[in-house]
Image (tube, helix red, strand yellow):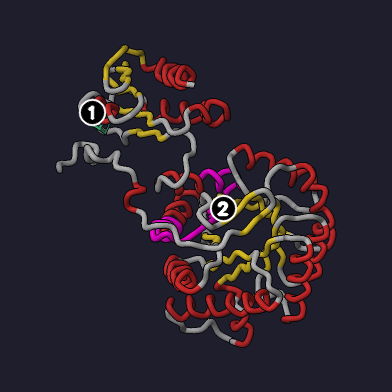
Amino acid sequence: MTANNCGQTPQSGLRAKSLLRPRRTTRKVRVGELWLGGGEPVRVQSMCTTDTRDVDATASQILKVEEAGCEIARVAVPDMEAAKALGAIKKRIHIPLVADVHFDHRLALEAIRQGVDKVRINPGNIGSRERTEQVVRAAKERSVALRIGVNAGSLKILKDWDQWPDWSAQDWARQMVQEAQEQIAVLEDFGFRDVVVSLKADDLSRVLLANRLFSETFDIPLHLGLTEAGTLLPGSVKSAIAIGTLLMEGVGDTIRVSLTEDPATQTKAGFEILKSLALRQYGPDIVACPTCGRCEVDLFKIVRDFEKRLDQDPALFKKAQGKKIAIMGCVVNGPGEARDADFGVAGGKGVGALIEKGQLTRTLAETQWVDALVEKIEKKG
Ligand code: SF4
């Protein structure tokens, strides 16, 4: 098989799905109207950056991430005022709401009273077994799911250490799983099964090893992510490797890409990971070339403008779902690549050839490309 000038083989259309191991079988957990695990689609979550006490700001940020496709929204609950705001937020949104609670189990109890769909607790800082028991009892009474969120940086055991332990990634993974297991035991004593677990760290090795280890033993759905992924480009790459590797191994039921970016961007990054693995559909698959010395149109601008049109028009984005659209810089490789797409454009000197199902149908000025592609999507409806 020879690669062409763009570095893609003629088999680049081979779907990633055929490379995935079968999904791990887990129990199914209900979170509001959604189900996690048990063969359900991998769900994409995000977390608000607003002050939860500000109901207007938080509800409108959640409505915005809903538009981006986010399926579960989490909010921080740092104090009782934030906990008491949850009921009002919940009334204004359409996706399940998760309360993120650290340190004070009373906040978890209030969040449950306010009607949230899931509570995330951190076993490293929620306190005694008795406190966890109170939360479990309340969650059971109201059929609220719990997520045991274990973070490497806030493991219980670290409280007893003056210095950061000199552990291997394997040691970290074992400790993370052990602390999750201790909390699961408390939940199981109450016959509580609506639990999801996350095992996060800021580096790949601990995340991969901990999640693999956990999935070998438990049938509990896993929420995947890094604790702090970083800024857009490095954070997306790191998250795609960590989350993507586990998903390819069949591990993971819900994901969050924790970028230093707004929650809508985090949501989009999550869906792009799932789309690359053919696990979910999310808008079109835009195959744009990187350009080279052969390109004689402003391809970067054309692609940016096209993405902007899709971004600003959710109905158009939806209509383009599942379509493969090629935007290629020249006719050397462009038509070949576009042949594998539903439709596309391949550039010449300030012009382009519209290609539909492999056939060249029209010549377009460079300024007409975006409109022509939008028109094609609209017609395909
Ligand atoms: S300009 Fe042509 S040869 Fe260069 S990367 Fe784009 S499609 Fe490939």
Q: Residue at x 52, y 26 (%)?
A: 309
Label drawn at residue 303: none
Instruction: Measure how far apart labels 2 and 1 are at the Cα level.
Output: 38 Å
Say if disc 2 is inside 8 Å of ligand 1.
Answer: no
Picture coordinates of residue 155, whole percent (x, y): 59, 77
Q: Residue at x 65, y 75 (%)?
A: 188
Q: Nearer the viewer, residue 293 or 119?
A: 119
The N terminus appears in which quarter of the rendering? top left
Picture coordinates of residue 138, whole percent (x, y): 79, 67
10 Å neighbourhood of mark 1: few (<14), some, or many (≥20)? some
Q: Is residue 275 left or right of residue 223?
A: left
Q: Quadrant of ligand 1?
A: top left
Q: Residue at x 73, y 43 (%)?
A: 93
Picture coordinates of residue 249, whole percent (x, y): 39, 61
In terms of secondary structure, where does tag 1 sit? helix
Res 14 visible: yes
10 Å neighbourhood of mark 2: few (<14), some, or many (≥20)? some
Q: Is 133 one of the magenta-colored residues? A: no
Q: Is residue 312 left or right of residue 342?
A: right
| 2 vs 1, front mark | 1
Residue interval drawn in magenta = 242-268
Q: Amino acid at mark 2?
A: Thr
Instruction: Name the residue tied to disc 2.
Output: 260
Give above or below for 68 relative to 244: above
Instruction: Name the residue tied to disc 1.
Output: 336
